[in-house]
Amino acid sequence: MINLLYAAFLLLVAGAIAVAAISRHKGACGWAALGFVSAASACLIYLAAYVFFEGEVKAVGLLNLHPLIGTSLSVEIDPLSALFLIIISVISFCVTLYSIRYIRHYEKESLLRYYPWLLLFFASIVGVVCMTDMLFFIIFWEIMTLTSWALVVYERENKESLKAGLIYFIVTHMATGCLILAAVILYSYTAGPSFSFEDLRAVLKTQLIVNPALVHGVLILFFIGFVTKASTLPFGFWLPLAHPVAPSSFSAVLSGVMIKAGVYGIVRLFCSILPISTCSQTWGIVIALFGTFSIFIGTMSALTQDDSKRLMAFHSIGQVGYMFLGIGAGFYFLPVNSALATIALVAGLFHMVNHSWFKSCLFLNAGSVLYKTGTRDLNKIGGLFRIMPWTGITALIASLSIGGIPPFNGFASKLVIFESTIIAGKEVGAAILARGLFVILGLAAIFISAVTLASFLKFINSAFLGKLRGVEETSGSDVPLSMQIPQGVLAFLCVLFGVVPLLPVTIVYKAVSGALPAGLCPALASLFGKVWPGISLDFGVGRVSGVWDPLWIIVAGVILIGAVGFMVRAGGAKVRQVETWYGGREHLPAETSYRGHSFYGPFKQIFTFHFKSIEFRGLYPTRFSLPRITMPKGMRIFLNPDQWFYYPMGRLFMKLTHGLSRSHTGHPQMYLLWTAIGVILVICILLYLPAK
Amino acid sequence: MSAGWTIGVAILNLFLALALSPLLEGCARKLRAIIHSRIGPPIIQPYYDLAKLLGKEDLRSSANPLVRMAPLACLVSVAIAALLIPMGTFNASTGTFEPPLGAYGDSILFIYCLALTAVGTIITGAASENPFAFIGASREMMMHLTVEPVLAVALMAAAINARSFRMGDMALWYHAHGPAPSMILAALFLFLALQAQIGKLPFDIPEAEQEVMGGTFIEQSGPQYALLRWSMMAKQIVFCSVFCQIFIPWPMMGHIAWDVLIHLAKVFVLVLILALIDVVNPRLRIDQSVRYYLHLGFFSLSAIFVALAGF
């Protein structure tokens, strides 16, 4: 079975080389990349399914570096890795298919700088989630960072993208530096030289008793390394810069797959590597607090954005916050109430899976709008539903999903997050302060969920509804089929995971219980499985405390829709198309358009304020001037050798040669005279030499 | 629980929320007329209005299919919300308050069903392509943003007390465990938010006929408008029922006919109080209302703290 992993990896790497070779053929290049990626995706999905049904697959000591540095390349695919492999394979397939036509609208750019990097990126992230050795984990992590950077700066003539790329490069490398430092510190404590997760776990286990401060120090480093990638505020400030400038297809990957690598790192570290103790409780609170901070600030600032992709990028920060809220609550309650902890962890990871579907879909929608209208500015477009109905419908489904509207998938995962944090208020085993804290965090998450909905209704309203703007009326139909299919697939997954929530919950539950020490999690049926195919939540009190079973709700809804529809039809009203009514006056649509910027003005006003010279727009600092760093004057002069060395030397040389140049008068007689003098001189010398 | 009981209660809930809501609206109108020293329309006037609107010509300013679907979603989501709350239906044989769909959805679903109603209104307005409707949509969303937290906090205070998110368990807990300070606080805050939840003065800012000519409803006519108006009326009953059943679950006779009648009487009184507030108040501006509800939402957290302290 492990051969499938090698096959997928080799397919992706070989694909990168092959695609690079044919990158001049624009059509063939995309299809070839799609072929390689879909073959690799099929392998990975089959492998993941095998892992879920049959148990984990591992291979130890593939590349033994023991004499050198004390490590060996070992892979292990447990259900947690398999969960990520499913996300990676679905998103990679959708994005590669989408790219075929989308990337060709960047006419100036070469495909050589897109597909090979994209395939290498997929290969590296497959490596990241399968490693059980810290050294190789970091190596693949670094390849992932570099390839993603190459794709962020795809538009290399665009100053904005170069600047965002530079910030991304610096920030993520500082994060990688933290990871390396933490790994090396632990390495120095291992019994024999080793980077493997098991040995690191043993080190942490002894150090927790001997020297807890060291453990906390190492965890801080790991935490910074992972949450920077997962773009939790205040470490994730690179994300709102990098996501909008990357090609939309790759923005979908950044948001749908890459920031999840940070979530994977956190879950793997705290579930599988760190032994469960009071230490994981402390860090649970820290993770939940950082998560809620991101939820609040990220989503509030998203509300003030008018750039479609920047809006979504801020929401990525917010949604990662939801995942961390669930995961953090899970870590906190692991030693107290394993049922509640398992439900909270499942909630966080379930939301992560859902976020991959709806956020990738939304980025592809924004890409389609960009493809059709050439702008990301929500103030310049409108009414696109008329010419792009398919994109509009998928965008609506994804927006309602992210806003947590039933029966879509976002509702199911948010419900579990809300309930598992709020029920913590009655968890007698926990400290009263922590209980209160989690309840407040859960309520903040409920409030922000409505803000998310508001923000995406603004996107839908200003881009797809209203009067047609930003594109010619006659500009034809929707985006090409190869761009519609990926959006449709992702929107379908949103609906499927919402209507049958027990399916993804079962998968995620297996991932969580596989990553935690064996025997810790209560059985799935006792936690979730009282109603089928919905989910019922039992927080270890022996009765169902919360429930979401979409099947019967939908049946009731369909019956009601039928009844009301019948009643409307029985009314027999005629339908007539009329002009828009502007209060009795004649107006052109262009004069009366309501732009995206105008939405929610008074609400945004409350959360926009100045602090000294910094403007906080939606609680996020914008437009601030960094303090100027000045150096001593002597230093500045010393660092500028032009001033005191090159230019003076140059001037001196010029002055010297100026005298010589005067001898070039231009008269032939003069040159003849010089020649004659020269000849005489030479003869004199020749005569003189033998005499000596 | 028997299927017959569930279906019977479902029909009863739908009857109260959908069929009886225009009657209560008619009573509220009559009260308004009395205060204005008018005779006013007969109290079954809202039924006439709905019947008339259902047969009137449907004028559409946009060919967008969402114009047709969104009002339907609005009404159906309110009806589902009505099926998620107990309306005086105490099942003496099992000793529960279980609402008809209570086994399939809990209070979070209830909150989000009402969010779906707001979404339906907003999409209807925006799809009609009228700039006034956009203003109304923006206001509707801002109201929802600031009012929803108060409802959520009140219901979550009940959930923390009952240690369950199911509406039936909450009602049962409060009925059994007598008046609790946290629930009284939550009821107070929820009462202050009711006026905005059901879209009455001084918080009917999204419609604001004198300013934005009905806001999201400006282009609506015929059956679409009938559905939207009907969902507004049904929403009033749903909110009043939640208030009366979860936060004031007394008195209870233990016999279903009496309990439903008592519930209806409580809802009737509450509707009249809300109508009274509606008549004697002018409309607020949207920024005033947003600030008011943000503060209210913040202070309503006190109910949570009291509930956490175990009172």
Image: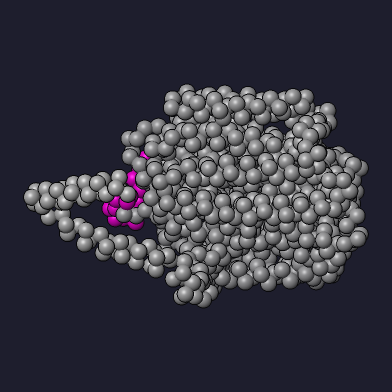
Residue B268, position in %: x, y?
67, 61
Residue A653, position in %: x, y?
30, 61
Q: Does residue A175 appear anywhere in the picture? A: yes
Q: Does B58 appear above or below B270?
A: above
Q: How is the image coloured?
A: one colour
Is residue A26 or residue B196 the one in the foreground?
A: A26
Q: Does B151 appear above or below A686?
A: below
Residue A639, position in %: x, y?
47, 66
Q: Residue at x 46, y 31 (%)?
A: A101
Which quarter of the figure has residue A553?
top right
| Quarter of the image with the N terminus of chain A in it | top right
Q: Residue at x 74, y 59 (%)?
A: A220
A147 displayed left or right of A62: left
Give the magenta-colored segment's residue range. Answer: A576-590
Q: Residue at x 42, y 59 (%)?
A: B213
Q: Does residue B70 appear anywhere in the picture? A: no
Residue A656, position in %: x, y?
27, 62
Q: Total of numbered circles in the picture?
A: 0
Q: Is residue A577 magenta?
A: yes
A168 displayed left or right of A470: right
Magenta segment, principal secondary structure?
loop
Q: Is residue A131 magenta?
A: no
Is residue A83 or residue A395 the one in the foreground?
A: A83
Q: Residue at x 63, y 61 (%)?
A: A234
A160 displayed left or right of A401: left
Is residue A633 or residue A84 the one in the foreground?
A: A633
